[in-house]
Image (tube, rainbow, N blue to C red):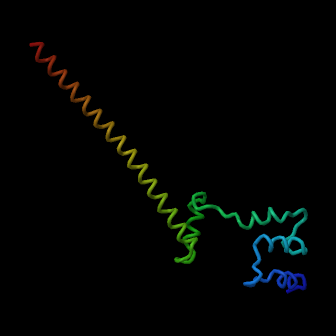
Amino acid sequence: MTPAHATTARKTEVTAQHPVTTQQLVETAWRENHPLRREGADPARDLQAITMAKAPSEKTLDELAQDMHTRADGLTHLMAKAEMELRRTSAQLRAVSYMRAASVAAAVSAASAAIAAGAAAYVAFLGR
């Protein structure tokens, strides 16, 4: 550990009497020429980059599959599992609504065919 890292570690030590927030950690690293500091860096933007993770609903299936390979009782795994179940359920509901529309169309088609057959039989009966 280099002297700069040791200084940073001492200054940002988390204790019960002096809790340190994530923002304070980022600002300290930014001020002290930490390896994470870059030319023109902004501690507020760095904090957003650190704390902003994708919501499960915004993740792709590949990202959710990666999250499923974490610890089974971990929050990431459970959130990915819930999101996959939600997507599966919504896909099933969409399929059910399409099937319902198709069955209504088939029923209307059968009814119209029955009406046409009845009309044809009536005309044939009257034509005798």
Counting from the top left corner in percent of width and height, residue 87 is at: 49, 57
Q: Is residue 82 above or below residue 107?
A: below
In the rendered structure, the answer to whether residue 109 lies left or right of residue 30 reads: left
Q: Dividing the picture into quarters, in which one does residue 5 lie?
A: bottom right
Which image quarter: residue 8? Answer: bottom right
Number of on-image labels: 0
For the residue pair 84 and 79, the one nearer the viewer reads as 79
Residue at the far left: name it.
128
Q: Quadrant of residue 40?
A: bottom right
Up-down relation of residue 59 to residue 17 (above or below): above
Residue at x 58%, y 62% (from the top left corner):
56
> Residue 35 in the image: x percent, y percent?
86, 74
The residue that appears at 41% across and 49% down in the rendered structure is: 95
Return the x and y of residue 100 as percentages of the image width and height.
Answer: 35, 44
Report the quarter where the N terminus lies.
bottom right
Q: Residue at x 78, y 70 (%)?
A: 23
Q: Position of residue 29 (x, y in %)?
A: 85, 74
